[in-house]
Structure formats: C-alpha cells, structure tokens
Image: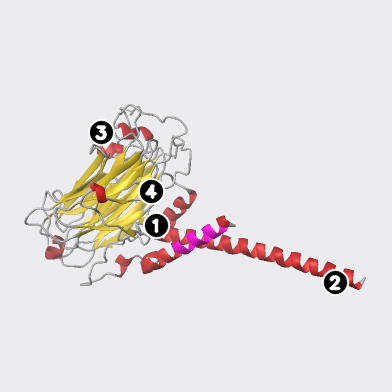
C-alpha cells in the first residue's frame, strides 16, 4: 500500500511540473516567436529546487543525487556546494550557465566546474567559454569523480565539494547568470568494464541523407529539448536564439550531425561564427562544438566524427572521446549569432539538422541497478520517433502512473464491495433460515 501512495505522489509531482512549464509540453515556444517579438527564455527544469552557493566550502549546501537545482552566479563568482559520495560509484555534477540574452562577452569569459575532496584535491573538472563565437548562449559543462582502484586520491567515501567559478572580462556584461545544476551517480558494474581504447574506429562520414526534411522545432532548454532520430529535420531559428534537441544513443551506436543555414534574399554581408552547434552527453558534459560563418548563401557545419558509445572511451584524455562514455540522451544545441539581425533582419533563418545514427545497439557493460539516464529504453525510442520533449515524456509517464494507481485502487475498492455484498447475502440467508 505504501508503494501505491508513493506512485501517486510521484505522478502528481510530475504532472504539476509539466503544468508549470505551460505550453512547453505542447507546441514548442519557439514556434510562436515571430517578427520583433522577444526571444523565448531558457526553459529551466520545472522540478528544480532553489539552492544558494556558498562563498566557503564550510558553508556549502548539499546537492542530492538525482536532483536538479537552480542558482545565480555573479561576475567572477566563486561558489561551493557539497555532495556526499561513496567510494564505489562514478559521480557527475553538471552546470548549465544561462547568461542574459544580448549581453557582451569576450573570448576569455566562461566558467569552470570542479569536484574537490576535503583536502582541496581536484578530482575532475571541465571548463567552458564562448571562444571565437562571442555572443551569449547557454553553456554546459560537468565535473566528475571517477572511481579508480589504481588511484589514491578522491576515492574515499565522505563529503566532497563542487566549485563553480565564473570568469568575466572587464568590458563584458557584468550581469548575473542563472545556472541549472544536476547531480547524477552512475550505477556499479556487475563486473569490470573494458578499459582498452581501440586505435582504429570508423570515422568516415556516412553517405549524405536525402529527401524532404521533416519539421521539428527545437526546445528552449535541456528540459524541453525536442527528440530526434536519424533523418533530416527543419526548424526556424532567430538571431540570438538557441534551439535544443536530444538524440538517443545506445551502446555501440555512433552519431554524425550537421547543421545547415538556408540562404537569404537579404544582402550578402559575411558574419563570422554565425552558427554554433554543440554536443553534450547524458550527464551534460561537453563533448564537441563547431561554428560556421554566414554570407547570405547556404552554409553547413559538421561536428567532428564521434566514436561509438563505449565504456572504454572514458579512459581517453580527449574530451570528445571520453564524453561518449555511456548510453542515453545526447543533446544538440544550435545558436544563431545576434549579429545576423544587423545584416539580415530579425526574422527567422531556415535551419536544417541532419542526424545519422549508425550501428545496431550492443549490450552495455552491465550495471547492477537501474541505469537511469545512462540507457536507452523503448519509451525513449518512441519519444524520439514522435519528437516528444523530456517535459512531455515526464507528463506521459505521470499520466501512466496515475492511471495505474486509479486502476489498482478501483480493483481494490471493487473487491471490497464484492466481499461485503457476499457477506451481507450470507447473513441474510442465515437469518431467513
């Protein structure tokens, strides 16, 4: 009975979360933006809790495993959070930094997220910046604590600290950034996974996709990212806008992705780094990013060839390889430079994404518990076919839980009524006799 109550509460919470997003669960918000309307804001996880980063590790607030949080990061800010880790499982803490739209940023602006033990030793970190595409957009990075029997540092159970540091140049926008924080733990393996990284792997670009692109407008954040499968997908993107997508990749599968900006009838001035295409893994660790300029003619960029998803990829020191370390949803984000508006107007520019997913799924390394986000389920595949966002999938799961709860409760109530009716009949017959 306690289990049923838990299902009902979780279902209610998920329905409330989806309702809080409003129309995110229906037509993507970007599709409603037109002309001079304001760009839709970043869609934060509706279930995220507010947390306040501390100036000292001694005052750091805890981040629970499997939860999402929101906070604010000031210019040149440096804040701590606390996580309690065991000595067995790999741990990932991701940060999505969301600057205000239209702000000025420079090459050195960005942030770093790291995990440290109680002696200040850095267990793992990732650093992200705007690089040559100097315009504001969401940036994602993660820190990881990897369990390694051959290492003596960062292996003991206990308190660890997550440090998020922002760097802001003097001439850049000094406004606060919103941040979205996730804490995930990877289940244990039933037996040791492979550790030898193959030297040879298929890196040749697959044959180009042809045919008519299907409409699939992206989301405004990780939470409402539109799902994709292999194919060609058409969207509209406005200057300064970021569209989010997600692609399910199982063990052994390989992703190739390109983005094409359609031609414009307005002018021919060249805009450098006009489009950024970025790839993040299921724990929201940064994997790869590419940019392309735009001069009014169609322009295409391609992410570098990614290795097939494999456990042994984590042994690499190359970010683009180690990032392809587990199965699950991989996230693509495309950002169009706001400078496009100055040269070509504020209207939408046609965007075509071409996604190739090669190879049949293989068996994974074998987790000893529910892999959570580090797997591709039949429901994930259906969501990708339909184009459902994470928010929609949560709402559908909540409805399913609610219907199962109602059905279970209905069966229980019906059984009680039947038993009561039978007892009443038996008593009545005995009295008559």
Q: What's the residue at 57%, 61% (across, down)?
A: 405
Q: What residue is disc 3 on?
A: 317
The picture places residue 60, in percent across and down from the top left corner, at 27, 50
Q: Nearer the viewer, residue 257 or 96?
A: 96
Q: Nearer the viewer, residue 5 or 338?
A: 5
Residue 65, label in figure: 4
Q: In the picture shown, does residue 423 fall above or below 212?
A: below
Nearer the N terminus, badge 4 or badge 1? 4
Q: What's the residue at 48%, 38% (across, down)?
A: 368
Q: What residue is disc 1 on?
A: 390
Residue 8 is a magenta residue: yes
Nearer the N terminus, badge 4 or badge 3? 4
Q: Nearer the viewer, residue 402 or 33?
A: 402
Q: Secondary structure at mark 1?
A: helix
Q: Secondary structure at mark 2?
A: helix
Residue 172 is a magenta residue: no
Residue 428, label in figure: 2
Q: Between tags 3 and 2, which lies in front?
A: 2
- The answer to whether residue 202 is visible is no
Q: What's the residue at 26%, 65% (across, down)?
A: 41
Nearer the N terminus, badge 2 or badge 4? 4
Q: Nearer the viewer, residue 262 or 391?
A: 391
Q: In the picture shown, does residue 175 fall above or below 312?
A: below
Q: Between tags 4 and 1, which lies in front?
A: 4
The picture places residue 290, in percent across and down from the top left corner, at 21, 47
Task: Measure the alpha-carbon separation of dots 2 and 1.
Answer: 57 Å
Nearer the N terminus, badge 3 or badge 2? 3
Task: Measure the alpha-carbon separation of dots 3 and 2.
Answer: 81 Å
Q: Are marks 4 and 3 in contact (CB under 8 Å)?
A: no
Residue range in magenta is: 4-13
Task: Measure the alpha-carbon separation of dots 1 and 3.
Answer: 31 Å
């Amino acid at each position: 009975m306690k289990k049923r109550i838990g299902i009902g509460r979780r279902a209610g919470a998920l329905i409330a979360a989806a309702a809080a997003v409003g129309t995110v669960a229906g037509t993507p918000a970007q599709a409603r933006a037109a002309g001079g309307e304001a760009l839709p804001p970043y869609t934060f996880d509706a279930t995220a809790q507010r947390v306040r980063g501390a100036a000292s590790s001694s005052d750091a607030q805890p981040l629970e495993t499997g939860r999402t949080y929101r906070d604010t990061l000031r210019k040149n800010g440096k804040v701590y959070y606390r996580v309690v880790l065991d000595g067995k499982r790999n741990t990932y803490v991701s940060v999505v930094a969301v600057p205000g739209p239209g702000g000025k940023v420079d090459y050195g602006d960005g942030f770093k997220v790291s995990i440290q033990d109680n002696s200040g030793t850095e267990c793992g970190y990732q650093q992200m910046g705007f690089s040559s595409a100097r315009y504001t957009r969401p940036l994602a990075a993660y820190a990881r604590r990897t369990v390694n029997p051959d290492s003596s540092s960062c292996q003991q159970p206990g308190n660890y600290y997550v440090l998020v540091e922002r760097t802001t140049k003097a001439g850049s926008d000094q406004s606060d950034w919103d941040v979205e924080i996730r804490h995930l733990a990877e289940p244990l393996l039933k037996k040791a996974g492979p550790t030898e990284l193959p030297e040879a792997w298929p890196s040749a670009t697959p044959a180009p996709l042809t045919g008519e692109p299907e409409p699939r407008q992206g989301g405004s954040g990780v939470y409402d990212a539109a799902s994709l499968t292999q194919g060609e997908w058409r969207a509209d993107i406005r200057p300064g806008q970021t569209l989010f997508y997600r692609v399910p990749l199982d063990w052994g599968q390989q992703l190739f992705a390109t983005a094409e900006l359609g031609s414009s009838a307005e002018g021919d001035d060249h805009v450098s780094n006009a489009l950024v295409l970025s790839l993040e893994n299921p724990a929201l660790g940064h994997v790869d990013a590419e940019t392309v300029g735009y001069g009014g003619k169609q322009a295409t960029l391609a992410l570098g060839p990614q290795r097939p998803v494999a456990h042994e990829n984590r042994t690499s020191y190359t970010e683009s390889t180690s990032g392809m370390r587990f199965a699950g949803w991989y996230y693509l984000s495309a950002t169009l430079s706001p400078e496009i508006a100055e040269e070509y107007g504020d209207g939408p520019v046609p965007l075509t994404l071409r996604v190739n997913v090669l190879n049949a799924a293989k068996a994974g390394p074998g987790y000893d518990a529910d892999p959570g986000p580090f797997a591709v389920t039949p429901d994930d595949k259906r969501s990708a076919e339909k184009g459902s966002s994470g928010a929609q999938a949560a709402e559908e799961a909540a409805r399913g839980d609610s219907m199962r709860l109602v059905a279970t409760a209905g069966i229980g109530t019906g059984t009680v009524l039947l038993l009561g009716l039978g007892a009443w009949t038996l008593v009545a017959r005995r009295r008559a006799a």
